[in-house]
Image: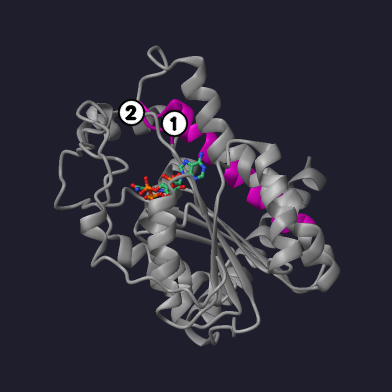
């Protein structure tokens, strides 16, 4: 009995020590780490034609990497983003690539390796949302969300990680969601995929401990004010306003450039996660109801993206690779 108590005590001290050490390390990293140089990097961003992916592509372009590749299904959006990147004198290519198809991912990965080179920063950003209760979800909705939000991350990692390991240089980034850490009514399929990406990235982070020079980053943003969750309402929108794409982009770039493993946006969500971990799950239900989270997706609707909102039409740029 005493021996078992001593053992638990020793384990608790060890856990507290590690937590303390890692917290200090994270704070130190946040304040003192200089952003890394990406001028020799080949960056690939899935879903880079619009939304957060487009903003990330333009933010990378400011840092003048060797090449920026964007993937998506809509060629008009991809072309516009590529042109805006090349206006900043950065080489860029776009590939029409539906990431729900494993064979297409592998085919485009081979093409990129041959025509551009080894991707060194992979940003798995493309995501889709059905926004229906599980009762109304059709098998196609579920399979499609799983393919885009989860399986595509696995296939891209399998396609690009071997070269990163060979070269001793790489970074895998995952745009997840707070719904990868907390469940919510009306998004069972989406939350499943985002929880899966959390598991994937944690496992990957641990597997890559054995290799030097390769980093992982996972970002968990709350709702972003860009139409993906159009109509989503909370009871106190002033207390929990939707995030701006620019804020998510800036924080994501900082996390990538300082090799942070995980970021939750906004930062006060760490408190929510803490209480979620230590309190019984049933105690969250009244809190969810009070905040109106049980009705949050009731007014959800699809919003067609508007190119005009993304800024001026681009001029063509013939000098760079397509
Ligand atoms: N918006 C939010 O409230 C929010 C909150 C937390 C996390 N996130 C996550 O952030 C990421 C970016 O989303 P966003 O806010 O920028 O939403 P968005 O504006 O709807 O953009 C989604 C992006 O994913 C691409 N995409 C979707 N299905 C694809 C497919 N099958 N193949 C290739 N590309 C595909 C789209 O490109 P095409 O249309 O050209 O295919 C588009 O570029 C997603 O992973 C999302 O889950 C978003």
Residue 121 in the image: state x and y as whole percent: 63, 67
Residue segment shown in magenta? 183-207
Residue 181 visible to the viewer: no
The dominant secondary structure in magenta is helix
Residue 16 in the figure: left or right of residue 53: right
Q: Which residue carries the number 1 mark?
A: 281
**Magenta-colored stretch includes residue 192:** yes
Q: In the rendered image, which quarter contains the C terminus?
A: bottom right
> Looking at the image, which residue sits at the far front?
318
Q: Residue at x 84, y 64 (%)?
A: 210
- Of residue 45 and residue 286, the one placed in the foreground of this image is 45
Disc 2 marks which residue?
285
Residue sitting at x 56%, y 31% = 146
Kind of element beneath mark 1: helix
In percent of width and height, residue 179 lies at: 43, 41
- Quarter location, residue 296: top left
């Amino acid at each position: 009995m005493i021996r078992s108590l001593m053992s638990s005590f020793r384990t608790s001290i060890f856990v507290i020590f590690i937590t303390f050490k890692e917290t200090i390390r994270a704070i130190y990293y946040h304040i003192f780490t200089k952003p890394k140089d990406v001028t020799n990097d080949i960056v690939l961003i899935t879903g880079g034609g619009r939304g957060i992916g487009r903003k990330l592509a333009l933010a990378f372009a400011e840092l003048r990497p060797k090449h920026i590749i964007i993937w998506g299904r809509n060629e008009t959006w991809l072309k516009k983003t590529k042109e805006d990147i090349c206006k900043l004198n950065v080489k860029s290519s776009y590939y029409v690539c539906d990431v729900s198809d494993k064979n297409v991912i592998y085919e485009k990965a081979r093409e990129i390796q041959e025509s551009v080179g080894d991707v060194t920063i992979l940003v798995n950003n493309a995501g889709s949302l059905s926004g229906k209760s599980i009762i109304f979800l059709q098998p196609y909705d579920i399979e499609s969300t799983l393919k885009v939000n989860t399986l595509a991350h696995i296939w891209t990692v399998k396609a690009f990680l071997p070269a990163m390991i060979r070269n001793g240089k790489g970074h895998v980034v995952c745009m997840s969601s707070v719904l990868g850490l907390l469940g919510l009514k009306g998004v069972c399929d989406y939350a499943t995929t985002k929880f899966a990406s959390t598991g994937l990235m944690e496992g990957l982070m641990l597997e890559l401990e054995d290799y030097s020079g390769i980093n992982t980053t996972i970002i968990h943003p709350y709702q972003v004010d860009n139409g993906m969750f159009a109509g989503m309402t909370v009871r106190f929108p002033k207390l929990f306003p939707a995030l701006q794409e620019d804020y998510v982009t800036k924080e994501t770039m900082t996390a990538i450039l300082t090799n942070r493993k995980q970021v939750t946006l906004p930062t006060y969500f760490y408190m929510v996660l803490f209480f979620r971990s230590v309190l019984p799950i049933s105690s969250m239900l009244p809190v969810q109801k009070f905040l109106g989270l049980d009705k949050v997706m009731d007014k959800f609707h699809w919003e067609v993206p508007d190119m005009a909102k993304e800024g001026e039409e681009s001029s063509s740029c013939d000098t760079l690779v397509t």
